[in-house]
Amino acid sequence: MDIFQMLKKDHHTAKDVLKKLETTGPRAAKSREKLFSQLKEDLEAHSHGEEAVFYPALRENAEMVDLINEATEEHAEVENLLEDLEELGPESEEWNSKLSELKKSILHHVKEEEGNIFKKAKEILAKEEIQRLGREFQEAKKQATAG
């Protein structure tokens, strides 16, 4: 799979887990914990892969610097929201509103990335590089979850 297919697949997975989380109530604490744990691990590995492999390949292009900086800031925002959710716990009354913030942040990031960043990246990167970045991204994600 090339880098764009892999990123889209991760985005789709995150959206699916968010949907499942939204359908759970405070009394489904075990389900929430399991789904949240999966989402957190997936997002952390995804962000690590992007920041270690995809973004550096694009940052060399002057047009991409602002977009990549914004995407990196969005990753930090998502990380902070994940930490907040973890601290609150799935039984907290505030959990759902924090989850809504997280979803909004993720959906915004996905829209920006799959729109603006992908469009420009496809113009910049050669086909071989797109394939190589996909392999390197997958490896970076494995390293993130192994550590």
Image (cartoon, grey):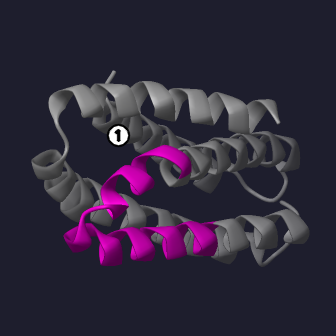
Residue 36 place in picture, x, y as percent: 73, 49
- In the rendered image of this protein, does residue 36 appear above or below residue 130? below
Q: Quadrant for the N terminus, please.
A: top left
Label 1 neighbour load within 10 Å: few <14, some 14-19, many 20+: some
- What residue occupies the far front of the structure in this picture? 60
Residue 76 place in picture, x, y as percent: 62, 72
Q: Tag 1: residue type? A: Lys
Magenta run includes residue 145: no
Q: In front here: 16 or 7?
A: 7
Label 1: which secondary element: helix
- What residue occupies the far top of the structure in this picture? 1
Q: In front here: 58 or 31?
A: 58
Magenta run includes residue 75: yes
Instruction: Read off the magenta span.
Output: 52-78
Quick check: 121 left or right of 112? left
Residue 63: name its quadrant.
bottom left
- In the rendered image of this protein, does residue 52 appear above or below residue 131? below
Residue position for label 1:
8
For the point 48% across and 63% down, which residue is it? 106
| Majority secondary structure in the magenta region | helix
Give the number of callouts: 1
For the point 69% across and 72% down, which residue is it? 81
Quick check: 103 left or right of 70? right
Residue 49 place in picture, x, y as percent: 54, 44
Q: Quadrant for the C terminus, please.
A: top right
User: Visible in this render: residue 34?
Assistant: yes
Quick check: 18 left or right of 82? left
Quick check: 20 left or right of 28? left
